Amino acid sequence: MTPQRKDAARNWEHILTVARELVDEGTPLQLNDVARRAGLGVGTVYRHFPTTEALLETVATPCLEALAGHGEQALTHDDPWKAFADFLTRLVEGQVTDAALVKVAATTQDVLPRTTELKAQILATGAKLLARARDAGTVRPDVHDDDLVPLMCGISYATYVHSASPADRLTTARRYLATLLRGLHA
Amino acid sequence: MTPQRKDAARNWEHILTVARELVDEGTPLQLNDVARRAGLGVGTVYRHFPTTEALLETVATPCLEALAGHGEQALTHDDPWKAFADFLTRLVEGQVTDAALVKVAATTQDVLPRTTELKAQILATGAKLLARARDAGTVRPDVHDDDLVPLMCGISYATYVHSASPADRLTTARRYLATLLRGLHA
DNA sequence: CCTTGAAACGGATAGCTCATCCGTATGTGT
DNA sequence: ACACATACGGATGAGCTATCCGTTTCAAGG
């Protein structure tokens, strides 16, 4: 994954850092922009990350991994409903905290295999948690696996429409999710 | 609104028709593109509609007017909860049916005064319906006026993430809205 | 019907962003 | 120290947006 030569590795990290900064400050990710900010040539950036999406996905990867981890952990909880609800909470909290995640989540076609893998894993975990909660009779039976991602994206989107500052976003997102969960509960 | 000279009026209509087609087929609205499709010079299109947003808002206006009308009508219904729920249903159905509406709805800053006015009117009606339903004890007290637009946008967004074809979208949107309404109901 | 000025038209083109390509520089193994 | 591979930089072309102005069309008054 990380390139061989030392300067290349250094630049790779540097590009990623700058990209993270840009994403965090809400600036739309543009590779020429990244290059300028990093004090590197455009070519260098494009060699490391052929497209904006590739860079974005790489930026989002650690966060996706964390979410996948939380999912695994949630599966070990006793209360099926709590496990399910907690997992969804983690997902929306991630999305409203990290702008990279939103964009990656809404995309169907991924550029990096790693992203595809992680998203599939998270989805699978969500499906398991949902099935468990449904079998326990705590979730309405008409909720399907395919609904989880859209609903999470919907909550995040609603949150972004509602509030500008990240602090407000967390509060709002939790409120909206609470409403949704009431609607999902049997 | 419509220009004086006959050729200008004809072109104005024609541009709007082409724009409507482009929006309906999901193509991103680009003024040069509109010009080519309409068999007009770029300048002509830009004179009638200085920006993409202006054209988009003009395309969306009839639909916004219809929604505003439905809102007025809903206010006359007896059952406060039904009136509220029906209005929200109209809103999401509009958004998932008409791509122009989604874009216009999510934008905070409008280009045309007419759009600003209509959106304000729709929001005001929504607020009244919400207040009425809340006073009747049918809506949870922690739902605020500011939440209506974000929630509607969220539902639409979730719907677009979930399903590609317009037919599927209507079904999905209704399902998601039903879930949300259960969550909002006291 | 003809004239005339205003209104509208068309499209060449300037400005901008994105992405590539290749000559130059730098790191690494012998 | 040499040579080769690897990586770097930025000039540059492709594509898109939006403007500007010379030309054309309309319609009101003679």
Image (tube, coloured by chain):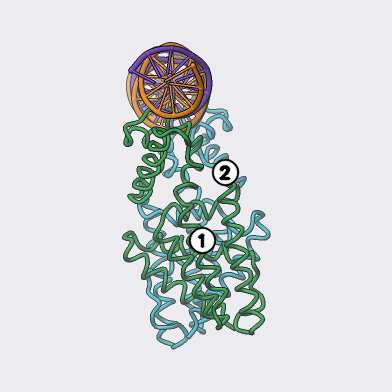
Chain colours: A cyan, B green, C purple, D orange
Q: Is residue A46 visible?
A: no
The residue closer to the viewer here, A180 or B71, is B71
| Residue neighbourhood size for the residue with mark 2, other residues' Cα within 10 Å, grouped as few (<14), some (14–19), many (≥20) | some
Report, in whole angstroms, how far the alpha carbon at label 1 lies from the one at label 2: 20 Å
The image quadrant where one finds the N terminus of chain A is top left
Which disc number belongs to residue B108? none
Please identify the quarter of the rendering in which residue D14 is found: top left
Q: Position of residue B52 (x, y in %)?
A: 47, 40
Q: The disc labelled 2 sits on which kind of residue?
A: Val
Q: Position of residue B135 (x, y in %)?
A: 67, 81
Q: The disc labelled 1 sits on which kind of residue?
A: Cys
The residue closer to the viewer here, C25 or A78, is A78
SS at badge 1: helix
Give the left or right position of residue C25, taking residue B166 as reference: right
Q: Is residue B159 visible?
A: yes
The residue closer to the viewer here, C8 or A94, is C8
The residue closer to the viewer here, B98 or A70, is B98
Residue found at x 55% / y 37%: A14
Sequence order check: which comes first, mark 1 or mark 2?
Answer: 2
| Residue lying at the far bottom of the rendered structure | A137
| Residue neighbourhood size for the residue with mark 1, other residues' Cα within 10 Å, grouped as few (<14), some (14–19), many (≥20) | many
SS at badge 2: loop
Which disc number belongs to residue B153? 1
Q: Position of residue B15 (x, y in %)?
A: 39, 39
Which disc number belongs to residue B111? 2
Q: Are marks 1 and 2 on the same chain?
A: yes
Q: Position of residue B114 (x, y in %)?
A: 57, 49
Task: Check the residue under mark 2 and report the chain it is in.
Answer: B
